[in-house]
Image: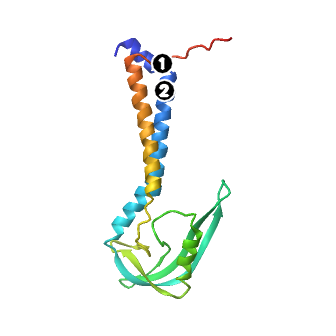
Amino acid sequence: MSRQKLKEFFTWGPVWVLIGMGIFTITIGSCVNYFLCLNPWWEVRKSVSWHPVKAVVLSSKVNTRSHHKGGLTYSIDLRYEYRWKETQYIGNRYWFWPDTSDGAKLHSIIRRMPKGRVITCYIDPANPSESVISRESNFSITAFILCTIFIIIGISILIFTIKSYCSGTLKNEWEPVEKK
């Protein structure tokens, strides 16, 4: 790349707007994918080797929140007590997945866990304060695919922009709009 072409590339123009759009879509797709799909999936995988212990339910209910689009989101509010190597712990995690819009499913879970019920929880022997009741996988393939498509779109924008700029079909300068 010549010195002039390099100078032109690093000035503010359409190339940088497109690069910014590409980076933005990759970042959003990656973050949502990580927090909604990959991190919970990884936690489920890690918990396969955790030890089962008996626990007593201290409290259980379903929390309801309304969100900006007018719908409701539900989460499990659960507290249970368990012992590991003569130490008492309080756990509050039912599963590794984020909130859900399936309130009926959560209400059915909570009905099976009234206060005082003895249940099985799974604890991380390396960190006994980490516990979970359900190690089931609620992996959302739809969310994963949508996030991955978002990432692919961002990568495509970057590739298109850089290839077009290098081939000379995209200039990094604003052209004045002609008035009619």
Label 1: few (<14), some (14–19) or many (≥20) C-alpha neighbours in 10 Å: some
Q: Quadrant of residue 166?
A: top left
Q: Which residue is mark 2?
A: 16
Query: Residue 159's spot in the image, x, y percent?
Result: 39, 30
As shown in the figure, which amino acid type bears the numbered disc 1? Asn
- The answer to whether 160 is drawn above or below residue 82 in the figure is above
Instruction: Judge from the rendering whether residue 42 lies leftward or rightward of residue 70; answer left or right.
Output: left
- The answer to whether 75 is drawn above or below residue 111 in the figure is above
Q: Residue at x 34, y 66 (%)?
A: 46
As shown in the figure, which amino acid type bears the numbered disc 2? Trp
- The answer to whether 102 is drawn above or below residue 110 in the figure is above
Q: Is disc 2 in contact with disc 1, using a CB cutoff of under 8 Å?
A: yes
Q: 5 or 177: which is nearer to us?
A: 177
- Give the quadrant of the C terminus: top right
- Give the quadrant of the N terminus: top left
Q: Residue at x 45, y 51 (%)?
A: 33
- Which residue appears farthest toward the left when viewing the image? 49
Q: Residue at x 39, y 64 (%)?
A: 43
- The answer to whether 31 is drawn above or below residue 132 in the figure is above
Q: 168 or 145: which is nearer to us?
A: 145
Disc 1 on helix, strand or loop?
loop
Marks 2 and 1, the one that precedes in the sequence: 2
Q: Which residue is mark 1?
A: 172
Query: Residue 82's spot in the image, x, y percent?
Result: 44, 82
